[in-house]
Image: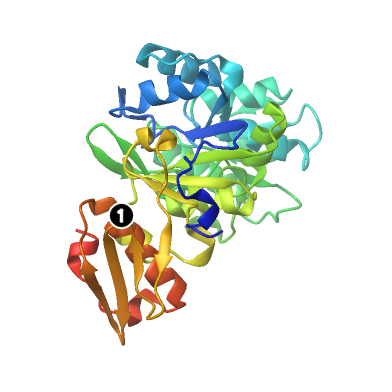
Amino acid sequence: MALFRRSTEGRAPLDGVDLVLADLDGVVYKGPDAIPYAVESLNAVAETLRVGYITNNASRTDASVAEHLTRLGLRVAPTDVVTSPQAAVRLLAQHVAAGSRILVVGGDGLVAEVEKGGFTVTRSADESPAAVIQGFSPDVGWAELAEASFALQGRTDDERPWIATNTDWTIPVARGIAPGNGTLVSAVHTAVGRLPLVAGKPERAIFDEAVARFHAQKPLFIGDRLDTDILGANRAGIASVLVLTGIDGGKQLLSADAESRPTFIVRDLRGLSEPYPEVKTAKNGAVSVRDATVAIDGNDVRILSEGTDELDLLRAACAAIWNSGRAIYGLEVPERLYS
Protein backbone atom coordinates (compact mmCIF):
# COMPACT_ATOMS: atom_id res chain seq x y z
CA MET A 1 0.00 0.00 0.00
CA ALA A 2 1.47 3.37 -1.00
CA LEU A 3 2.25 5.93 1.67
CA PHE A 4 1.38 8.97 -0.41
CA ARG A 5 -1.30 9.56 -3.01
CA ARG A 6 -1.93 12.81 -4.84
CA SER A 7 -5.64 12.52 -4.10
CA THR A 8 -4.91 13.05 -0.40
CA GLU A 9 -3.51 16.56 -0.85
CA GLY A 10 -5.36 18.86 1.50
CA ARG A 11 -7.50 15.99 2.78
CA ALA A 12 -7.27 14.50 6.25
CA PRO A 13 -6.70 10.78 6.91
CA LEU A 14 -10.30 10.63 8.20
CA ASP A 15 -11.85 11.85 4.95
CA GLY A 16 -14.02 9.23 3.26
CA VAL A 17 -13.75 6.81 6.19
CA ASP A 18 -16.77 5.07 7.79
CA LEU A 19 -14.95 3.30 10.66
CA VAL A 20 -11.85 4.10 12.70
CA LEU A 21 -10.13 1.13 14.34
CA ALA A 22 -7.46 1.92 16.92
CA ASP A 23 -4.84 -0.26 18.51
CA LEU A 24 -4.45 0.37 22.24
CA ASP A 25 -0.92 -0.06 23.63
CA GLY A 26 1.21 2.73 22.23
CA VAL A 27 -1.74 4.43 20.50
CA VAL A 28 -4.29 5.20 23.22
CA TYR A 29 -2.27 4.49 26.35
CA LYS A 30 1.02 3.31 27.80
CA GLY A 31 0.43 1.25 30.92
CA PRO A 32 -2.48 2.81 32.83
CA ASP A 33 -2.05 6.32 31.43
CA ALA A 34 -3.45 7.95 28.29
CA ILE A 35 -1.05 9.12 25.61
CA PRO A 36 -1.21 12.91 25.11
CA TYR A 37 -3.98 14.03 22.72
CA ALA A 38 -5.28 10.48 22.21
CA VAL A 39 -8.49 10.70 24.24
CA GLU A 40 -9.65 14.09 23.01
CA SER A 41 -8.80 13.19 19.41
CA LEU A 42 -10.72 9.90 19.48
CA ASN A 43 -13.70 11.49 21.23
CA ALA A 44 -13.79 14.08 18.47
CA VAL A 45 -13.71 11.32 15.85
CA ALA A 46 -16.53 9.47 17.64
CA GLU A 47 -18.84 12.47 17.21
CA THR A 48 -19.22 11.65 13.52
CA LEU A 49 -17.72 8.18 12.95
CA ARG A 50 -17.89 4.74 14.56
CA VAL A 51 -14.75 3.98 16.55
CA GLY A 52 -13.64 0.48 17.47
CA TYR A 53 -10.61 -0.75 19.36
CA ILE A 54 -8.41 -3.71 18.45
CA THR A 55 -5.91 -5.20 20.86
CA ASN A 56 -3.51 -8.13 20.73
CA ASN A 57 -3.20 -8.00 24.53
CA ALA A 58 -4.86 -11.19 25.78
CA SER A 59 -4.58 -10.51 29.50
CA ARG A 60 -7.90 -8.67 29.89
CA THR A 61 -11.54 -9.05 28.88
CA ASP A 62 -13.30 -6.71 26.47
CA ALA A 63 -15.30 -5.40 29.44
CA SER A 64 -12.16 -4.59 31.45
CA VAL A 65 -10.59 -2.89 28.42
CA ALA A 66 -13.74 -0.82 27.92
CA GLU A 67 -13.74 0.12 31.60
CA HIS A 68 -10.11 1.23 31.41
CA LEU A 69 -10.80 3.32 28.30
CA THR A 70 -13.85 4.85 29.97
CA ARG A 71 -11.75 5.84 32.98
CA LEU A 72 -9.36 7.58 30.61
CA GLY A 73 -12.28 9.63 29.30
CA LEU A 74 -13.36 7.72 26.18
CA ARG A 75 -16.93 6.63 25.49
CA VAL A 76 -16.55 2.88 24.99
CA ALA A 77 -18.76 -0.20 25.42
CA PRO A 78 -17.40 -3.78 25.58
CA THR A 79 -18.82 -4.44 22.11
CA ASP A 80 -16.54 -1.69 20.76
CA VAL A 81 -13.48 -3.76 21.73
CA VAL A 82 -12.16 -6.56 19.51
CA THR A 83 -9.56 -8.72 21.26
CA SER A 84 -7.10 -11.31 20.03
CA PRO A 85 -8.64 -13.90 22.42
CA GLN A 86 -11.97 -13.44 20.64
CA ALA A 87 -10.29 -14.07 17.28
CA ALA A 88 -8.33 -16.99 18.75
CA VAL A 89 -11.45 -18.71 20.09
CA ARG A 90 -13.13 -18.40 16.71
CA LEU A 91 -10.06 -20.00 15.18
CA LEU A 92 -10.10 -22.68 17.87
CA ALA A 93 -13.71 -23.56 17.02
CA GLN A 94 -12.60 -24.36 13.47
CA HIS A 95 -10.17 -27.00 14.67
CA VAL A 96 -11.71 -28.79 17.68
CA ALA A 97 -15.16 -30.01 18.65
CA ALA A 98 -17.53 -27.87 20.68
CA GLY A 99 -17.18 -28.38 24.42
CA SER A 100 -13.61 -29.72 24.18
CA ARG A 101 -11.15 -29.36 27.06
CA ILE A 102 -8.57 -26.67 26.24
CA LEU A 103 -5.26 -26.00 27.95
CA VAL A 104 -5.11 -22.24 28.50
CA VAL A 105 -1.83 -20.41 28.94
CA GLY A 106 -2.74 -16.81 29.70
CA GLY A 107 -4.81 -14.51 31.85
CA ASP A 108 -8.44 -13.91 32.75
CA GLY A 109 -9.27 -12.33 29.41
CA LEU A 110 -8.32 -15.47 27.53
CA VAL A 111 -9.99 -17.79 30.03
CA ALA A 112 -13.23 -15.82 29.81
CA GLU A 113 -13.32 -16.00 26.00
CA VAL A 114 -12.55 -19.72 25.94
CA GLU A 115 -15.39 -20.38 28.39
CA LYS A 116 -17.67 -18.01 26.48
CA GLY A 117 -16.95 -20.11 23.39
CA GLY A 118 -18.37 -23.17 25.14
CA PHE A 119 -15.06 -24.88 25.90
CA THR A 120 -13.78 -26.35 29.19
CA VAL A 121 -10.62 -24.80 30.60
CA THR A 122 -7.74 -26.74 32.07
CA ARG A 123 -4.30 -25.64 33.22
CA SER A 124 -2.75 -29.12 33.16
CA ALA A 125 -1.36 -31.18 30.29
CA ASP A 126 -2.26 -34.29 32.31
CA GLU A 127 -5.96 -33.73 31.54
CA SER A 128 -5.49 -34.60 27.84
CA PRO A 129 -6.57 -31.26 26.35
CA ALA A 130 -7.86 -31.22 22.78
CA ALA A 131 -5.80 -28.08 22.04
CA VAL A 132 -3.54 -25.46 23.58
CA ILE A 133 -4.37 -21.77 23.41
CA GLN A 134 -1.77 -19.23 24.49
CA GLY A 135 -2.01 -15.51 25.18
CA PHE A 136 -0.08 -12.84 27.03
CA SER A 137 -0.40 -12.28 30.75
CA PRO A 138 2.22 -10.71 33.03
CA ASP A 139 1.65 -13.64 35.37
CA VAL A 140 2.64 -16.34 32.85
CA GLY A 141 5.81 -18.05 34.00
CA TRP A 142 7.91 -21.14 33.50
CA ALA A 143 5.34 -23.52 34.97
CA GLU A 144 2.61 -22.45 32.51
CA LEU A 145 4.98 -22.57 29.55
CA ALA A 146 6.13 -26.02 30.61
CA GLU A 147 2.51 -27.30 30.71
CA ALA A 148 2.02 -26.10 27.14
CA SER A 149 5.25 -27.82 26.11
CA PHE A 150 4.22 -31.09 27.77
CA ALA A 151 0.84 -31.00 26.04
CA LEU A 152 2.31 -30.34 22.60
CA GLN A 153 5.33 -32.65 22.61
CA GLY A 154 4.98 -35.46 20.13
CA ARG A 155 1.65 -34.12 18.81
CA THR A 156 1.04 -32.82 15.31
CA ASP A 157 -1.06 -29.79 14.39
CA ASP A 158 -3.95 -32.11 13.52
CA GLU A 159 -3.67 -34.14 16.72
CA ARG A 160 -3.47 -31.21 19.14
CA PRO A 161 -3.76 -27.70 17.67
CA TRP A 162 -1.77 -24.88 19.22
CA ILE A 163 -3.26 -21.41 18.79
CA ALA A 164 -1.57 -18.18 19.85
CA THR A 165 -3.57 -15.01 20.33
CA ASN A 166 -0.65 -13.05 18.86
CA THR A 167 3.11 -13.09 18.48
CA ASP A 168 4.07 -9.52 19.43
CA TRP A 169 7.69 -9.65 20.53
CA THR A 170 7.32 -6.66 22.83
CA ILE A 171 4.65 -4.71 24.68
CA PRO A 172 4.90 -1.06 25.81
CA VAL A 173 4.21 -0.53 29.51
CA ALA A 174 4.52 2.44 31.85
CA ARG A 175 8.19 1.72 32.66
CA GLY A 176 9.29 1.01 29.09
CA ILE A 177 9.29 -1.86 26.58
CA ALA A 178 8.76 -5.37 27.98
CA PRO A 179 8.68 -8.89 26.45
CA GLY A 180 5.37 -9.68 24.74
CA ASN A 181 3.49 -12.85 23.87
CA GLY A 182 5.78 -13.62 20.94
CA THR A 183 8.64 -14.07 23.38
CA LEU A 184 6.60 -16.53 25.46
CA VAL A 185 5.40 -18.39 22.35
CA SER A 186 9.02 -18.63 21.21
CA ALA A 187 9.94 -20.36 24.46
CA VAL A 188 7.34 -23.07 23.82
CA HIS A 189 8.35 -23.31 20.16
CA THR A 190 11.95 -23.92 21.23
CA ALA A 191 10.80 -26.78 23.46
CA VAL A 192 8.43 -28.51 21.03
CA GLY A 193 9.79 -27.65 17.57
CA ARG A 194 6.53 -26.46 16.02
CA LEU A 195 4.76 -23.18 15.40
CA PRO A 196 1.26 -22.10 16.44
CA LEU A 197 -1.64 -20.85 14.41
CA VAL A 198 -1.91 -17.10 15.10
CA ALA A 199 -5.21 -15.23 15.47
CA GLY A 200 -4.17 -11.66 16.20
CA LYS A 201 -2.21 -9.05 14.30
CA PRO A 202 -0.49 -9.28 11.85
CA GLU A 203 -2.82 -12.07 10.74
CA ARG A 204 -6.00 -10.75 9.17
CA ALA A 205 -8.54 -12.73 11.24
CA ILE A 206 -8.82 -10.03 13.91
CA PHE A 207 -9.24 -7.30 11.26
CA ASP A 208 -11.87 -9.29 9.40
CA GLU A 209 -13.80 -9.78 12.63
CA ALA A 210 -13.71 -6.04 13.37
CA VAL A 211 -14.82 -5.00 9.88
CA ALA A 212 -17.67 -7.53 9.96
CA ARG A 213 -18.76 -6.55 13.47
CA PHE A 214 -19.03 -2.87 12.59
CA HIS A 215 -20.33 -3.39 9.02
CA ALA A 216 -17.62 -1.15 7.59
CA GLN A 217 -16.92 -0.39 3.94
CA LYS A 218 -13.97 2.00 4.27
CA PRO A 219 -12.20 1.45 7.59
CA LEU A 220 -9.02 3.17 8.75
CA PHE A 221 -6.72 1.46 11.23
CA ILE A 222 -4.34 3.26 13.62
CA GLY A 223 -1.30 1.48 15.04
CA ASP A 224 2.16 2.10 16.42
CA ARG A 225 3.96 -0.99 15.11
CA LEU A 226 4.89 -1.84 11.55
CA ASP A 227 5.41 -5.58 12.04
CA THR A 228 1.97 -6.24 13.53
CA ASP A 229 -0.39 -3.26 13.14
CA ILE A 230 0.53 -1.99 9.69
CA LEU A 231 1.42 -5.38 8.19
CA GLY A 232 -1.91 -6.77 9.43
CA ALA A 233 -3.92 -3.85 8.08
CA ASN A 234 -2.21 -4.17 4.70
CA ARG A 235 -2.95 -7.89 4.60
CA ALA A 236 -6.60 -7.11 5.32
CA GLY A 237 -6.72 -4.40 2.65
CA ILE A 238 -7.31 -1.60 5.17
CA ALA A 239 -5.81 1.89 4.99
CA SER A 240 -3.50 2.53 7.94
CA VAL A 241 -2.00 5.25 10.09
CA LEU A 242 1.33 4.85 11.90
CA VAL A 243 1.32 7.12 14.95
CA LEU A 244 4.70 7.96 16.44
CA THR A 245 3.70 7.57 20.10
CA GLY A 246 4.56 3.90 20.61
CA ILE A 247 7.06 1.30 19.47
CA ASP A 248 8.21 2.26 15.97
CA GLY A 249 9.75 5.50 14.84
CA GLY A 250 11.87 6.95 12.06
CA LYS A 251 14.48 4.22 11.87
CA GLN A 252 11.87 1.49 11.48
CA LEU A 253 9.85 3.50 8.94
CA LEU A 254 12.84 4.22 6.72
CA SER A 255 13.67 0.51 6.54
CA ALA A 256 10.09 -0.79 6.27
CA ASP A 257 9.51 -3.42 3.61
CA ALA A 258 6.75 -3.02 1.04
CA GLU A 259 4.21 -5.02 3.08
CA SER A 260 4.71 -2.98 6.25
CA ARG A 261 4.37 0.61 4.99
CA PRO A 262 1.50 2.75 6.30
CA THR A 263 -0.82 4.92 4.27
CA PHE A 264 -0.23 7.86 6.64
CA ILE A 265 2.35 8.86 9.27
CA VAL A 266 1.24 11.18 12.08
CA ARG A 267 2.98 12.59 15.13
CA ASP A 268 -0.01 12.02 17.43
CA LEU A 269 -3.73 11.46 16.97
CA ARG A 270 -4.45 15.12 16.28
CA GLY A 271 -3.06 14.33 12.85
CA LEU A 272 -6.14 12.27 11.99
CA SER A 273 -8.17 15.38 11.24
CA GLU A 274 -5.39 17.59 9.88
CA PRO A 275 -4.77 18.08 6.13
CA TYR A 276 -2.25 15.50 4.96
CA PRO A 277 0.57 16.81 2.75
CA GLU A 278 1.20 15.79 -0.83
CA VAL A 279 4.49 14.23 -1.85
CA LYS A 280 6.09 15.78 -4.94
CA THR A 281 8.80 14.12 -6.98
CA ALA A 282 11.00 16.29 -9.17
CA LYS A 283 12.42 15.21 -12.54
CA ASN A 284 15.79 14.59 -10.88
CA GLY A 285 14.13 12.23 -8.38
CA ALA A 286 14.22 14.57 -5.39
CA VAL A 287 11.19 14.14 -3.13
CA SER A 288 9.53 17.04 -1.33
CA VAL A 289 6.87 17.17 1.35
CA ARG A 290 5.95 20.81 1.85
CA ASP A 291 9.37 22.52 2.33
CA ALA A 292 11.37 19.39 3.22
CA THR A 293 13.29 17.74 0.37
CA VAL A 294 15.28 14.50 0.23
CA ALA A 295 17.13 12.92 -2.70
CA ILE A 296 19.14 9.76 -3.32
CA ASP A 297 22.54 10.36 -4.90
CA GLY A 298 24.29 7.08 -5.64
CA ASN A 299 24.30 5.27 -2.30
CA ASP A 300 23.76 8.44 -0.29
CA VAL A 301 20.44 9.71 1.03
CA ARG A 302 20.84 13.48 0.99
CA ILE A 303 18.81 16.13 2.81
CA LEU A 304 18.43 19.00 0.36
CA SER A 305 16.11 20.97 2.64
CA GLU A 306 15.25 20.17 6.24
CA GLY A 307 12.10 22.25 6.08
CA THR A 308 10.22 23.55 9.09
CA ASP A 309 8.66 20.27 10.28
CA GLU A 310 10.72 17.21 11.20
CA LEU A 311 7.77 14.97 10.38
CA ASP A 312 7.61 16.26 6.80
CA LEU A 313 11.34 15.53 6.50
CA LEU A 314 10.74 11.95 7.65
CA ARG A 315 7.80 11.57 5.25
CA ALA A 316 9.95 12.82 2.37
CA ALA A 317 12.81 10.49 3.29
CA CYS A 318 10.48 7.50 3.51
CA ALA A 319 9.00 8.27 0.09
CA ALA A 320 12.44 8.73 -1.49
CA ILE A 321 13.80 5.46 -0.08
CA TRP A 322 10.66 3.40 -0.66
CA ASN A 323 10.20 4.66 -4.22
CA SER A 324 13.83 3.86 -5.04
CA GLY A 325 13.27 0.13 -4.65
CA ARG A 326 16.64 -0.03 -2.86
CA ALA A 327 17.24 -1.97 0.33
CA ILE A 328 18.04 0.29 3.28
CA TYR A 329 21.27 -1.56 4.06
CA GLY A 330 22.63 -0.49 0.66
CA LEU A 331 22.17 3.19 1.43
CA GLU A 332 23.98 5.71 3.60
CA VAL A 333 21.24 7.37 5.65
CA PRO A 334 21.96 10.52 7.70
CA GLU A 335 21.34 9.99 11.40
CA ARG A 336 19.37 13.25 11.33
CA LEU A 337 16.52 11.39 9.56
CA TYR A 338 15.92 8.86 12.30
CA SER A 339 17.44 10.22 15.52
Label 1 element class: helix
Which image quadrant: the N terminus? bottom right
Q: Locate residue 220 relative to residue 30 in the image: left or right.
A: right
Name the amino acid, label 1.
Asp
Q: Locate residue 114 relative to residue 339 in the image: left or right.
A: right
Near-viewer residue (257 or 318): 318
Q: Residue at x 36, y 27 (%)?
A: 38
Colour mode of the rendering: rainbow
Image-quadrant location for residue 138: top left
Near-viewer residue (113 or 173): 173
Residue 31 placement (x, y as % from top left): 31, 28
Q: Locate residue 94 relative to residue 36 in the image: left or right.
A: right
Q: Residue at x 66, y 21 (%)?
A: 115
Look at mark 1 in the image and give the residue it sits on. 312
The tally of labels here is: 1
The outermost residue toward the bottom is: 298
Q: Does residue 75 show up?
A: yes
- The correct choice, above or below, for 122 with respect to 239 in the image is above
- The correct choice, above or below, for 52 with respect to 303 in the image is above
Residue 261 placement (x, y as % from top left): 48, 58
Q: Residue at x 49, y 17 (%)?
A: 66
- The correct choice, above or below, for 297 with respect to 113 in the image is below
Residue 198 placement (x, y as % from top left): 60, 48
The outermost residue toward the right is: 97
Q: Residue at x 54, y 33 (%)?
A: 21
